[in-house]
Each structure stands twice: as structure tokens, then as C-alpha cells.
Image: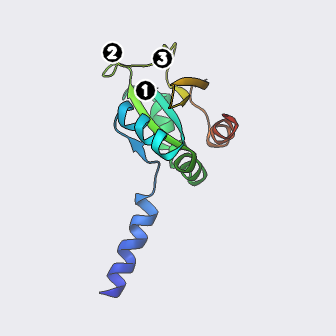
Amino acid sequence: MKILSVIFLLTISLFGAGINFEKDLVTAKQKAITENKKLMIMYSTPTCPECNYMKKKVFKDKKIISYTNENYVFVIMDIKKDKDILPYKFIGIPTFYFVNPNDMKLLSKKIGGTREAQFLSFIKQVK
């Protein structure tokens, strides 16, 4: 029984760890205020190849997971499904908005997908 518990915990730690995405902007904003973190918003669609690359590859990087969870509250918004509540205009996807959640002031923006090292460098530079 002890061995099964250890295997279960290892499985969770290996496959269950990831970026803690919030389900909607209102919840994400409130959580960011409460936790004194910046808000990261990604505009996306399920059919966007670059968006899916970011979700399946870049967001699985351990350094990105750790830094993002420690410093941001992250929400992904679908530009079609959420079109009436998108807080910022965009010209392409994916677009990442880095926001002060208290006043929703835009701190920085990044348009397009990128590799892990470049994304990590960018999110560390956001002030």
C-alpha cells in the first residue's frame, strides 16, 4: 500500500504540475489582487497553431511553470467565445497582455508565439 501511495504522488507531481490557469477574467483579476500578482491574459482560439504550440510545448516548461505560478495569475481568453468581454484590442493571436489587476493598466504586451527561453526572458522583464 505504501508503494502505491508513493507511485501515486510521483505521478501527480510529474504530470499534474502545470501553470495554474484561471477559468475567467473576473476570477483571475480578483485572485491577482488578492495574491498581489500581475495578471497575464492570453488571447487565443482552439484552432490557432501558434497558440496551441504555446499551450502544448512552452507552457509545459518547468521554469516557465514555476515563474508564471509564482508571479502571475494567468487566464486564456478565446477571441471568438469571449469577444464581447475582451478588455483590449488585438491584431493577431496569440497576444499576451501583462496587466496591473487593480486598475487594469496595461504594463506590457507581446504578440505571437515564441520558444521557451524567449518567453521566459520576456515574462521576467515585465515590470
Q: Is residue 93 visible?
A: yes
Residue at the spot 67% in from the left edge and 35% down from the top edge: 122
Q: Secondary structure at mark 1?
A: strand
Residue at the spot 56% in from the left edge and 50% down from the top edge: 70
Residue at the spot 55% in from the left edge and 46% down from the top edge: 68
Q: Secondary structure at mark 2?
A: loop
Q: CA distance from mark 2 to mark 1?
A: 14 Å
Q: Where is residue 125? Give x, y as percent.
A: 70, 36
Q: Secondary structure at mark 3?
A: loop
For the residues labelled 3 and 2, say whether their Cβ atoms are less than 8 Å apart.
Answer: no
Residue 103: image tag: none
- Which quadrant, please, contains the N terminus? bottom left
Q: Where is residue 60? Give x, y as percent.
A: 51, 49
- What amino acid is found at the position of numbered circle 1 in the picture? Ser
- What amino acid is found at the position of numbered circle 2 in the picture? Asp
Residue 44: image tag: 1
- N-term mark: 2 or 1: 1
Q: Is residue 116 above or below residue 97?
A: below
Tell which tag, 3 or 1, sits nearer the viewer.
Answer: 3
Q: Where is residue 82? Give x, y as percent.
A: 33, 22
Residue 84: image tag: 2
**Local crowd at mark 1 within 10 Å, few (<14), some, or many (≥20)?**
many
- What amino acid is found at the position of numbered circle 3 in the picture? Tyr
Q: Is residue 111 visible?
A: no
For the residues labelled 3 and 1, say whether their Cβ atoms are less than 8 Å apart.
Answer: no
Side of 19 relative to 38 (left or right): left
- Which quadrant, please, contains the C terminus? top right
Residue named by callout 3: 88
Q: Where is residue 31? Give x, y as percent.
A: 42, 42
**Local crowd at mark 3 within 10 Å, few (<14), some, or many (≥20)?**
few
